[in-house]
Image: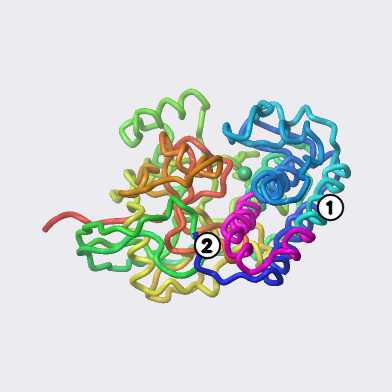
Amino acid sequence: MTATQWTADTLLTRYDEVRSHTERLAAPLSPEDQTVQSMPDVSPTKWHRAHVTWFFETFVLAENEAGFAPYQDQYWFLFNSYYEAVGPRYNRAERGVISRPGAHDVGVYRGNVDDRMRELVSSLDQGTVDKLAGTIELGFHHEQQHQELLLMDIKHVLSLNPLRPTYAGAPAATTTPDPLGWVDVEGGLVEIGHRDAGFSFDNELPLHQVWLEPFRLADRLVTNGEWLDFMADGGYQRPELWLSDGWAQVKAHEWRAPFYWTQVDGVWFEHTLHGTFPVDLGLPVSHVSHYEADAYATWAGKRLPTEAEWEHAVRSQGDDDATANLADTETWHPRAAGASTGRLRQVHGDCWEWTSSAYLPYPGFHPAAGAIGEYNGKFMSGQMVLRGGCALTPPGHARASYRNFFPPGARWALSGLRLADGGVRA
Ligand SMILES: [Fe+2]
C-alpha cells in the first residue's frame, strides 16, 4: 500500500540498503549462534536471513523472471513461513534442527537472489516498475520486520547460555525514575488508520471514524521501579488483579517477574543484548505479556489505552518523534524517558506498547488477492494490538497507524506499557 513513486534506480538503492542491514545485524553472530532455536516462537538467525530472501524469490522473481527456476526446490519448503497458497512448509517449531544449509550457504542463497533481483529490476520499464513496486516495497518492510525479530530472537537464544554472551553494545549509565505526568486528549469523532502517501500494511486500512470520549495517557512508559512496587504489593500473587487466562498462565508458568528478570541473592538482574545487569529502576519495564500489563494497570487503578486512543493521541500532538530510541541508536534496549516535555514521551521506540484492543480487521478490510493476502489478515484471531515501536525496530518502520500484534501471553517480544485513564462518558 503505497503512493511512493519508485524508479528502478530508487528501488535498487533501497533494496541494497535493506538487504545489507540484515547482514550487518547478523555479523556479530557465529554460524553456531545463527542455528539455535531456543523455543518454538524463536527462529534461528540464518532462517530469518533465508526466509526474507525466499520472500523476494517467491513473490517477485517467480512471477517476473524469464525462465524462472527456484534456487533450490527444497528451500521453498524450508523457508516458507506460513503461506498455504505457496505450498507445504517445514514445521516451524523444528527450524533449529536444520543444520544444513548452514549460515554460509544461506549467505550464498542471499547473494544469488540479490543478483537476480538487481538484474530483473534494472531491466524493467517504468510501467512495469509501477506494477511491481508495491510487492517489492512490501518485501522491504517484511525484511525490516524480520530484522526486529532476529534481534528479539537472538536475545532469547543468548539468555539461555550460562556464559552470558552479549550481542553488542554497552549498557547506558544507571538512571533514576522520573515523575510520571499525564497528557489530556480531547475526544470526539476521530479518524483512525493510514492516511498519507507513505507505505502501510493492509491491516492499517481502511481509514475509518471512531468515537472517543475525552481521556488521558501517561506521558511515559511504566518503569522497572514502578514494576518492583507492583511485585512488592503481591502483584503476581493476587488473582483479583488478573484476567482469568492471565492468572492461569501465572500459575502454569510460575510467573513472578518480567521475562528476562532473575533474582540472585535478593537482587533482581535483567538480561539484555549487551549483558546481564541489576534491574535499572528508571528504565521502562520490558518483556511483559499483555496479561501482566493489564494486571499492572488494574493494580494502579488505571487501564491500558485502546489502539484508537493511542493513535489519536499521537496524531494530536504531531507524529514527530525525532528522538525515538529505535534500532539506529544501537542501544539495543529501552532507555529512560528523560525530562518531562508536556508531551507524550517514548512514543516510537523503547518498547512496543500493549493496548486493550483485540487485533481485528478495520471496517471494510479486505486482504489482497492471492498468497500475499495471507500476510496479515489470517492472524486476526486471539491476538492483541501493540503500538509504537521498540529499541530493535529499524528506523522508517514506525508510524502512528502501525499495528503490531502478538498473543496476549507472549513475553519474548520487546513489549512494555503506558497507562490510560478517563475515556468515560461524563
Ligand atoms: Fe515473514
- Residue 288: tell me if it is visible: no
**174 relative to 268, above or below:** below
> Does the residue at mark 1 contact the one at mark 2 (Cβ under 8 Å)?
no
Q: Residues within 10 Å of mark 2 (few under 14, many from 20)?
A: some
Distance of mark 1 from mark 2, alpha carbons? 28 Å
- Assess whether residue 123 is covered by the magenta stretch: yes
> Seen in the image, is 191 located left or right of residue 149?
left
Q: Which mark is residue 398?
A: 2
Residue at 37% from the left image edge and 43% from the top image edge: 360
Residue at 32% from the left image edge and 56% from the top image edge: 308
- List the single residue furthest toward the left: 426
Q: Nearer the viewer, residue 181 or 123?
A: 123
Determine which quarter of the picture holds residue 14: bottom right
Disc 2 is placed on an element classified as: loop
Magenta part of the protein: which range? Answer: 118-146
Q: Nearer the viewer, residue 164 or 131?
A: 131
Magenta span dominant secondary structure: helix
Disc 1 is placed on an element classified as: helix
**247 relative to 116, above or below:** above
Q: Which mark is residue 111?
A: 1
Q: Position of residue 161 (x, y in %)?
A: 76, 37
Q: Position of residue 285 (x, y in %)?
A: 51, 51
> Ligand 1 is in which quadrant of the figure?
top right
Judged by depth in the image, the label closer to the viewer, 1 or 2, is 1
Determine which quarter of the picture holds residue 219: bottom left
Label 1 amino acid?
A: Gly
Label 2 amino acid?
A: Ala
- Residue 39: tell me if it is visible: yes
Image quadrant containing the C terminus: bottom left
Residue at 52% from the left image edge and 62% from the top image edge: 398
Q: Position of residue 23 (x, y in %)?
A: 78, 55
